[in-house]
């Protein structure tokens, strides 16, 4: 077990390397559908809606694949079913990519101990293809639903009530809070609470003016700014300091820029999953400050969406973009300062480890 946890970074990187094609394919398809529709929303009709659904399907597989291949890196092929199914459950209960990381590690640990059980000779051949995946999937699924799911639901309820109780007296402080929440887990439960709060505010019509209040538009501007900061910042960081990112991450950086421009925060997930200790705090700080700057400078956003694609309909669009730029520079700067250069030796070790995992698995089967 100590050896498994000691190689956590390698396991995370393996999961990320298998996840990246799903993020790129799904994210770019979704981004293109939004971009071609000309509106700050996912198209709901016609061919563009179909393209959007293809992209959404790809992004929907992102967390299960991440989880499954973290487990695969830890315990080989028997970990795939518990890991992927656990990752799907993490998505369904709203645990996001952090829940996927947790489910992958849980699956790896559980399968590791199941493999230590000595089966009778008559059942030994059924172990890796029937007994271990079945029991492992049940245990991981039970933990995700009955142990992890309830705290996540309670956290979402608490955060929603907390935001409602804050009021709008000091928009800058509220912007710091909402921006940090949006950038913290990039589509996960905390992000969704903040986004839902802003969307609800924009959807509330002032009975006198017949339009959303200026406060509601300001809140959504802060949220919209924070949505695009993580992916755009990670993309920028790969250009500023290419030696601190792997080849796969540099390729993901290009896709992250496209996704960030049209308000898809998930473009930053490969970076956060591979290096959560450095990337997540950087995202939170940049997202919080960028959101507060946009709100403090009087930007407003009538569209329940984010990224630069909403700038044409925003109030004070230059202030909105300025807020995003401030956040992007801060996040990218922190990441570049904190990350260490990636040596060719490290990349070769990771690639070799993946190949050995696959080769050993083939020999076993």
Image: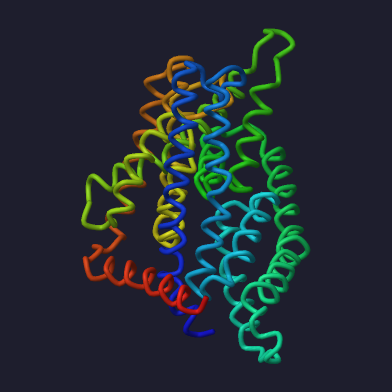
Answer with the quarter of the image where residue 350 lies. Answer: bottom left
Q: Is residue 56 above or below residue 73?
A: above
Answer with the quarter of the image where residue 213 lies. Answer: top right
Q: Which residue lies at the image location 64% right of the left edge and 50% below the top edge?
A: 91
Q: Which residue lies at the image location 53% right of the left edge and 33% below the top edge?
A: 223
Q: Quadrant of the N terminus?
A: bottom right
In the image, is 186 to the left or to the right of 122? left
Q: Is residue 76 above or below residue 324?
A: below
Pick the residue in front: 212 or 62.
62
Q: Is residue 127 above or below residue 150?
A: below
Q: Is residue 27 above or below residue 94?
A: above
Q: Position of residue 299 (x, y in %)?
A: 47, 22
In the image, is 145 to the left or to the right of 107? right
Q: Which residue lies at the image location 70% right of the left edge and 85% below the top edge?
A: 123
Q: Position of residue 74 (x, y in %)?
A: 50, 74
Q: Position of residue 56 (x, y in %)?
A: 56, 37
Pick the residue in front: 258 or 86.
86
Q: Position of residue 231 (x, y in %)?
A: 40, 42
Answer with the quarter of the image where residue 167 lies. Answer: top right
């Amino acid at each position: 077990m100590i050896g498994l946890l000691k190689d956590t970074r390698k396991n995370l990187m393996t999961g990320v390397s298998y996840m990246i094609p799903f993020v790129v394919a799904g994210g770019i398809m979704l981004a293109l559908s939004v971009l071609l529709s000309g509106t700050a929303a996912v198209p709901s009709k016609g061919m563009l809606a179909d393209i959007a659904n293809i992209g959404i399907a790809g992004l929907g597989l992102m967390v299960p694949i991440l989880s499954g291949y973290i487990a695969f890196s830890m315990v080989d092929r028997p970990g795939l079913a518990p890991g992927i199914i656990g990752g799907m459950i993490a998505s369904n209960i709203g645990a996001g990519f952090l829940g996927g990381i947790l489910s992958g590690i849980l699956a790896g640990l559980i399968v590791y101990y199941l493999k230590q059980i000595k089966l009778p000779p008559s059942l030994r051949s059924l172990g890796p293809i029937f007994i271990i995946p079945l029991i492992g999937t049940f245990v991981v699924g039970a933990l995700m639903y009955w142990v992890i799911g309830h705290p996540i639901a309670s956290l979402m309820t608490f955060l929603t009530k907390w935001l409602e109780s804050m009021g709008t007296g000091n928009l800058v402080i509220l912007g710091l809070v909402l921006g940090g929440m949006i950038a913290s887990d990039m589509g996960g439960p905390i992000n969704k609470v903040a986004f839902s709060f802003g969307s609800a505010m924009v959807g509330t019509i002032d009975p006198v003016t017949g339009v959303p209040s200026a406060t509601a538009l300001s809140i959504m501007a802060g949220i919209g700014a924070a949505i695009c900061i993580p992916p755009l910042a990670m993309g920028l960081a790969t250009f500023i300091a290419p030696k601190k990112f792997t080849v796969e991450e540099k390729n993901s950086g290009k896709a992250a820029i496209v996704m960030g421009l049209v308000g898809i925060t998930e473009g930053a997930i490969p970076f956060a999953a591979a290096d959560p200790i450095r990337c997540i705090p950087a995202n939170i700080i940049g997202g919080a400050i960028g959101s507060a700057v946009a709100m403090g400078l009087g930007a407003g956003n009538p569209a329940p969406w984010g990224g630069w694609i909403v700038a044409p309909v925003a109030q004070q669009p230059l202030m909105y973009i300025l807020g995003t730029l401030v956040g992007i520079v801060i996040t990218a700067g922190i990441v570049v300062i904190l990350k260490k250069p990636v040596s060719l030796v490290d990349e070769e070790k990771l690639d070799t480890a993946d190949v050995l995992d696959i080769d050993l698995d083939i020999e076993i089967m």
